[in-house]
Image (cartoon, helix red, strand yellow):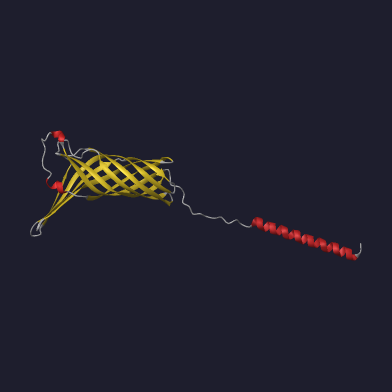
Amino acid sequence: MNIRNISLVFTLSLMTTMVFSQIEISDDTQLTEPVKEVSLDILPPLSTTEFFVIANWSRNSRKLIENDNNNGIYADPLGTRADESFLNTWSFGIGIKQRVHEYLTWEGGITYIQNGEFYLFEGVDTLHSYQTTYSYITMPVKAFFTYGNTVRFYAGGGLVPKMFLNYKQDQVFVDAVNNETTEEFKTQNGFNSFALSAVANIGVQLNLGKKMSVLFMPEYRFQLTTSNEKSDSYKHFNRAIGFNVGLTYGL
């Protein structure tokens, strides 16, 4: 083999080595290049069991029915009660919610509930008004159709057993010379110690992260048994429409 052929073989070998070296470097580069991950920033699902704290605002009214159980023995006219109107109240509660099925959640708790009525009479130079409130400790039990995970939607209701605490009436009198007099009357007499209401709710719960969520749930509540004793002239049934707003914590 002459010198020319040796040079040609050496040149071809060198070129082949360089080509394969470039291919290997390229393959290594592709294999070691980090893969970029796409973050969707989606919040985790809500917990199946949660503790909650709520506040309730309600617009209250009442239904009075003449008591036919006493055969008219205690009958008396309604008087100013015939002109009573709505009263806005706040109530508060705590409880536990548990999602026991994909579409079913139960709820139980304890709440302090107020309901009542308002009366106002304005004459030419006088004024008379009063605000009546009935206070209860209650133990509502509810069941909801449930849909969603990060955002949940609820529709349902239940029963609200109520233990009577007290009756309070705040009165205001203004006379012709603009003198104002206030009176407060409280009692536990004349009322049933136990009452029962039914409740209907529809609402939404939104995950805030770190096991916390916010809850907004409109509510309609209506009393099934009378507030008054059997001897009272009238049966008293509360009606309330409003909403619950609160926070929950996953357990």
Judging depth in this view, the residue of 6 and 188 nearest the camera is 6
- Where residue 50 appears, as percent x and y from the top left, is 39, 44
Q: Is residue 15 left or right of residue 189?
A: right
Image position of 68 with respect to 79: above or below: above
Please give the count of numbered marks on the rendered protein.
0
- Where residue 32 appears, as percent x and y from the top left, is 65, 56
Occupied quadrant, residue 106: top left
Image position of 9 with respect to 112: above or below: below
Which quarter shows the N terminus?
bottom right
Which quarter shows the C terminus?
top left
Occupied quadrant, residue 104: top left
Q: Is residue 204 left or right of residue 163?
A: right
Q: Residue at x 66, y 55 (%)?
A: 31
- Where residue 4 appears, as percent x and y from the top left, is 89, 66
- Where residue 26 appears, as percent x and y from the top left, is 69, 59
Q: Residue at x 22, y 50 (%)?
A: 87
In the picture as drawn, the residue positioned furthest to the left comes out as 176
In the picture as drawn, the residue positioned furthest to the bottom comes out as 4
Q: Residue at x 22, y 40 (%)?
A: 164
Q: Is residue 178 left or right of residue 26?
A: left
In the picture as drawn, the residue positioned furthest to the right comes out as 1
Q: Residue at x 13, y 34 (%)?
A: 70
Q: Is residue 37 left or right of residue 43?
A: right
